Amino acid sequence: SARLPAFRASLRSAHSGAGGPPFGWLTVPETRIEADVMSKIVLDTYLHVTDAGAFAKSFGRILQGELEEWEITGTLMVYSMGHFMSLSLCKNLSVPAVFMDSLRADGVDLAHGKESELATKLDLSFFSSSVLKLRDLGPLTFEVRLGDRPLEQAGAAPRIGRMTVPSFTVAQGVNALRNASFVLEKDAASEALVSAFLGRWLSGQDQQLLVSGPVGSTIPFLERALRRQPMFVAGLSNGLVKFVEMNGFHTFLGHDRQGKPCNRLVGSHCLQGPIVTFQNKLHHVMTLRDVSLDVDLMEELAYDVTLHSLRLLRRTSSCNRGRSLMRLRSLPGMWAQVNASRALDESVLVPAVQMGSERRETVLTAAFLAKEVPPDLLTGESSCLGDPRGDCCFASAVSAAACLALSRDHLIARSTLKGNLTLEVGTFNTTISVEQRGVPIGFTDDVRSLRVGAATASCRDFVFAISG
């Protein structure tokens, strides 16, 4: 056997070519070796960097998931059989990659918004198969870009924000880093991308982002060592809209802008539409303005409907609306029937979950949204008995959807809500596009009885086309 005393060894990357300068040094601890037996040296020591540029290139390859070769050189004294011998060491050391596999962000929550920045909090997790540990790196900040383009083009895309990890460490196995901050930055170059990210997230859609960096690190060799790391971001659980209710009063009769029930005989202007329940699982209030949402069913709506008047007159209209049911808008007067003091208000305030609530119980807000028919569905070919000026297919669509669901022993129908709205968080605001699938629509019993002027129809007066 022989004893190797601790010695100082220089390190250089094998990629730098023969004779390249070392990027640092470390102390190899004292080790005892035995004949014909593999000896193990545990390098639990600090690496002293002397050339930050050279080390950053080498370390960057490690962070990108590449196997790196470090050449270790030094002079050591070997003590064996009562004698010391001086030896020169030159060996390659294989350094395992530290690729952050399956990097994902969960529990994204709103923190605050001001002007051009929206701050969120999130928890990170990833898996590392490497035995190499990184510790005591302190807070690190990374640039964030949308990941909906090829990796080789991602570096040219405008960044949408920055992510800061308060205490960055990497160990073998699953790593969990809590309370990271992700700040979205809105400017002329990034506003469309920031809006796209927020719209998908609030719709409950999962996304991929790309992180690179660190930037502004106090550790020079880490600066921009990580080029493009995919990061999965989970969408907001269950999205922004929880439920849509169609009922006889709000959806069919309606109210005027002063909140009074409509009197169609005197031609008052009516606001008709459903009650939409918005949900918030976040710790910051959200304000929604300029809401415009198309409500599409998950299946085709094609039918014939026969309206009766005074049991003498009858008229059948054939309708094929595809999947479109109606368009919803926020308008002045939408709150008048519920709260007269908000008669001119056309925004939806979605309260936040109380701070300290560990279960994140959902806060619900019900708002009336006015319905209208999308212009491309006004054919002018289906005037109604009882109201020749109206579009019979638009007037009967809600009742048709309710009766179709009932014919299948369902009290609800599933829908897709898609459109635009302006999101405000604090003084931050941006217009976003949302598309939330699977939103349930509930129908009260009186919706299944259609009345247009003096003409009426019930579920037995609807004949539905059988879709292939």
Image: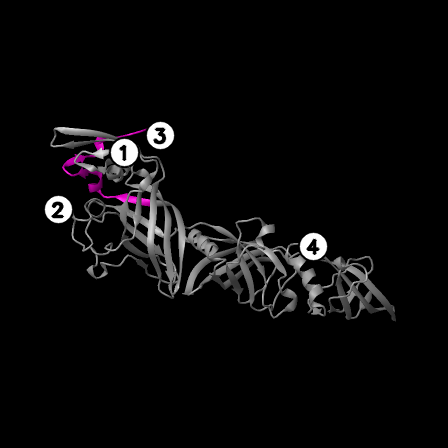
What residue did someone put label 4 on?
A: 67
Of tags 3 and 4, the one toward the viewer is 3
> Identity of the amino acid at label 1?
Ser
Q: Is residue 137 left or right of residue 248?
A: right
Q: Residues within 10 Å of mark 3 (few under 14, many from 20)?
A: few
Q: Is residue 243 left or right of residue 89?
A: left
Color encoding of the figure: one colour
- Give the CA distance from mark 3 to mark 1: 14 Å
Dot 2 and dot 4 residues touching (CB under 8 Å):
no
Please name the residue shown 31% across and 56% down the image.
364
Give the quarter of the image for residue 157. bottom right
Q: Residues within 10 Å of mark 4 (few under 14, many from 20)?
A: some
Tell me if residue 420 can be seen.
Answer: yes
The quadrant of the image that shows the N terminus is bottom right
Q: Going from the N terminus, do you reach mark 3 or mark 2 first?
A: 2
Give the quarter of the image for residue 72. bottom right
- Give the CA distance from mark 3 to mark 4: 57 Å
What residue did someone put label 3 on?
A: 467
Of tags 1 and 2, the one toward the viewer is 2
Percent x, y of residue 224 = 62, 62
> Measured along the vertical axis of the image, is residue 322 above or below residue 50?
above
Give the quarter of the image for residue 359. bottom left
Indicate which disc residue 266 carries.
2
